[in-house]
Image (cartoon, coloured by chain):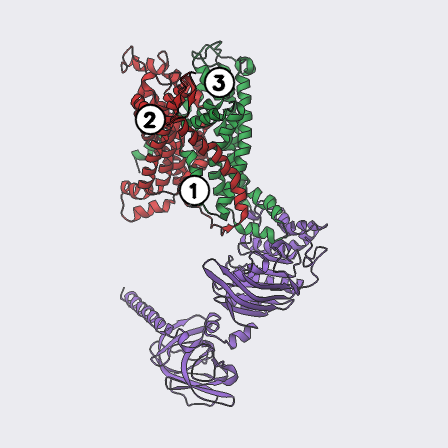
Chain colours: A green, B red, C purple
Amino acid sequence: MRGFGKYAIWVYSGMALVFLMVPIIYTIVFSFNDSRRTNIVWRGFTFDNWLNVCSAQGVCQAFANSILIGLVATVLATTLGTMIAIALVRYRFRFRSATTLLLFLPMATPEVVLGAGLAAQFLQAGVGKGIGTIILAHTMFCISFVVVTVRARVASLDPALEEAGRDLYASPREVFWRITFPLLLPGITAAALLSFALSFDDFIITNFNRGADVTFPSYIYTAAARGIPAEANVIASGVFLLAIALVLISQFSAAARRRKLALTP
Amino acid sequence: MAFGAFATSTTAAEPAARRKSPIALLLLLPGLLYLGLFFLVPLVSLVITSLQQPDPVVFGQYENAFRWENYVTVLQQYWPQTLRAFGYAALATLFALLIGFPLAYFIGITLRRWPLLQALALVLVIAPFFISFLLRTIAWKQLFSDEGPIVGFLQALAILPGDAAITGSAFAVVFGLTYNFIPFMTLPIYTSLERLDLRYVEAGGDLYASPPSTFLRVTLPLAAPGIMAGTLLTFIPAAGDYVNASREFLGSTDTAMIGNVIEANFLVLQNFPAAAALSLVLMAAILILVSVYVKRSGTEDLL
Amino acid sequence: MSMSAVPHSGFAEAGADLELVGITKRFPGFTAIEDLDLRIPAGSFFALLGPSGCGKTTTLRLIAGLEEPTAGRILIGGKDVTATKAFQRPVNTVFQSYALFPHMTIIENVAFGLKRRKMDNADALAHEALRLVELDHVSSRKPSQLSGGQQQRVALARAIVNRPALLLLDEPLGALDLKLRRQMQIELKAIQDTVGLTFLHVTHDQEEAMTMADTVAVMNKGVIEQMGPPQELYELPHTAFVATFLGQSNLMTGHVVSSSGNSMVVDVAGNRVEVPRERAQRHAGEVVVGVRPEKVTLHGSDPARQSGRNLVGPGRITDVSFSGVSTQYEVTSPDFGVFTVFAQNTSISRMHRDGDEVWMSWDVGHTFGLADEPSMVPVNRFDEDTDTSMIATQRREQLEAELEGA
């Protein structure tokens, strides 16, 4: 591609990136809207929404629920998924293809089916729906994503490193905690962040299994009918800015580390 | 990113020799039991529910039966929503590919010489994941609203008649679906292009292939696993989505998709058998489509 | 951990004997090692030499405890360690890929083994070991910040700091370039002299094995073909494999025509080749005999037959390659296939040219007789070599002609 084509891809991609940003910027801008009741029309700039985030009824409770659910589901899914990932890479066992199918299927099933299925199960078992059932549901759909993420890391781990540990008088337990685990940690961290993000933003499965409890997305869904308060924009924008800051910091520190490595003789 | 992992069919490092050990069972069992209990058993619950018949006395109560007619009823009643779901999802997948592939190519190949710009562009693609997708969809709704800037602008240009609206239309729903799934399409394609060795492309040029034929014969096949993963990651959730098509967001009753019907039957009408039957129809249709697609594309080792 | 073989309280005083008794290792589908017996005396530098896939790395992993033998026993310092795990054995390994822990600093890497054994002065000892390999100044860096040669030395320090009774080296120099490898060979040998441990070095590089080891065992297809000091292995190979894997050899097949006293005479396609009886492994019937290329002298005309020298010929020179200190000739004859001859480029020796007719002679005492059945030795190897070298020669002539024409 040369000449016109060379610039066309810059223009096209630039427009695509702007397109991706439009609703994000809109959401952030409207977190500063002096909206009073409905946050639809721009009525002027204010910091009030940011200073009194919890003034909108239930929004902070919903946010706290989402954080709690995200944390518990992340811990559960990351633990279970990491164990499976290690087993898949390191061990031979029967039913391997059945296992990979069982891990693939939740990712290939539409959320509405997962949600309805669990709701039907809880209904039949007579289990009351609430934060507990949301956590059970989120853990379920996060496991497969954890397995996929951690598996790649386990597969790229040089087995000689663990052998060197065994050779250097480390017991199997010490080999795991001092060598295997620290080396898998970047993969496990990525999987945990992904799980948290998936859980935090999940609406469809949650909606089927939440009972009377409210998460941040379900709060927005319910509020959408009568107008979403600007405080919801504040929370979403705050989470967004925090996440972006973390990503940028990690990107730049990785780049700095690479540069430092390149400079060391 | 896990989305990248979708696009990997080969792992770089040499695998350690796999051993047989009881530890394997210990590692697998908790997670697999969990998936069995909260993924497989619910599917069975769906089957049971889908065959239930209404309790003659209490409304909203059902008793176990073998009413397979439930499936006929829901298909007769909801075939437009079912077809619409797959139609919208297919369109959204196509548009997401048309936007996502050039974007992925741009980030993965064009921006290679500017690592900082590349990292920044990548952050922009991931950024939507960090902000509630419901709020992003609401943002589009408000931008597209009758008093909003876009409708006003188009009306001023007389492209849109004065009484026309965008929200509630099929266009708005497909637009919303496309927007929401662009990152899911872009990231896997990016991961497969990012690893693409530019020497292949040079070799293509060296072997007398014109740029378009180099692209078709070298770049595209090498990006195929990413395209494959991206289309699946877009099509499957888009077909089951009910947020974009719901009335409170970008749709109207005319744009209802199968997801909306399942939600309404389950959570509002309490017609659990109908919701369950529709869910199973959706799942079966998707599994058939996916397996045909996977077979035809020849990459069967997705996970 | 109450394994008596583990010197928990401190270091091994000196290297220990290693003994393998009837070791067999089978993997699903193939046998890597078949009934192997091996004894390595304490304090020696022992090299296990063989091509890839010969079972040498498996042997090393069995000794380290990273694999379990299918049958047989492993004894270190007279104690049976067959059933003990890797971390319980007084053995340390320098891995082929070095296997330095990437998430730890150099000093943490070196002190790792000492800390697992709860040694009090782990850091001090680790610094001492790093000084021995002259890398104490990089102790706070991460492995990725070191060059290949430095990583290799850290891997060595990390192993010897534990003063194992036995140090295993798994092709540790394989990843280094030639110059660095030479330097490391010398350093490794010097360190072994200093610390006096038993070294077991596994390699496919015959030069590496010969320059460093006191004893070399040549391994092929899971069995040890021959074992001894490097010079002895080179001068008197017992098998065709050893003769060709360890340096080059000219092998000839013939029938024993007489065997009396100290001498045995073999008829190689009409040429009379004499072998001292004690240098021959077989003394009757069809046998394979050989001579090293540098022991052979070329003659431009049929020389007078001398007692004490074997003479074959004539043959025609089909390839000459000059390499500075010496010249390598390939001599082809329908009688004995291809002969390789190395001639020192001293001023008195005259150069032979491509196409010259030559005779070859060598000292009877340099001839060796192999244990192999002649039918098992790939004698047709010569034909293939002839073909390739012929093609190469033709190609070169063609090229030269083109260049001259241009």
- Pick the quarter of the image with the C terminus of chain B: top left
Query: Left of B213 or right of it: where is A80?
Result: right
Write down the residue under mark 2: B71
Q: Is residue B207 above or below residue C64?
A: above
Residue A98 is labelled as 1
Q: Look at discs 1 and 2 and give the one toward the viewer.
A: 2
Whole-angstrom CA distance, mark 1 to mark 2, is 29 Å
Write down the residue under mark 3: A219
Q: Mark 1 — on which chain does it sit?
A: A
Asked if residue A265 shows in the view, the reply is: no
Camera-side residue of C185 and A149? A149
Same chain, labels 1 and 2: no
Q: Is residue B19 above or below residue B33?
A: below
Q: Mark 2 — on which chain does it sit?
A: B
Q: Is residue C342 above or below residue B198?
A: below
Q: Amino acid at mark 1?
A: Ala
Camera-side residue of A49 and A262? A49
Q: Look at discs 3 and 2 and give the one toward the viewer.
A: 2
User: Which class describes the residues within 10 Å of circle 3: few (<14), some (14-19), or many (20+)?
Assistant: many
Residue C360 percent across, percent down from the top left: 41, 82
Q: Amino acid at mark 3?
A: Tyr
Same chain, labels 3 and 1: yes
Which of the 4 image quadrants contains residue A55?
Answer: top right
Whole-angstrom CA distance, mark 3 to mark 2, is 33 Å
Residue at 40%, 36% (x, y): give it. Answer: B188
Q: Earlier in the sequence, mark 3 or mark 1?
A: 1
Disc 3 secondary structure class: helix
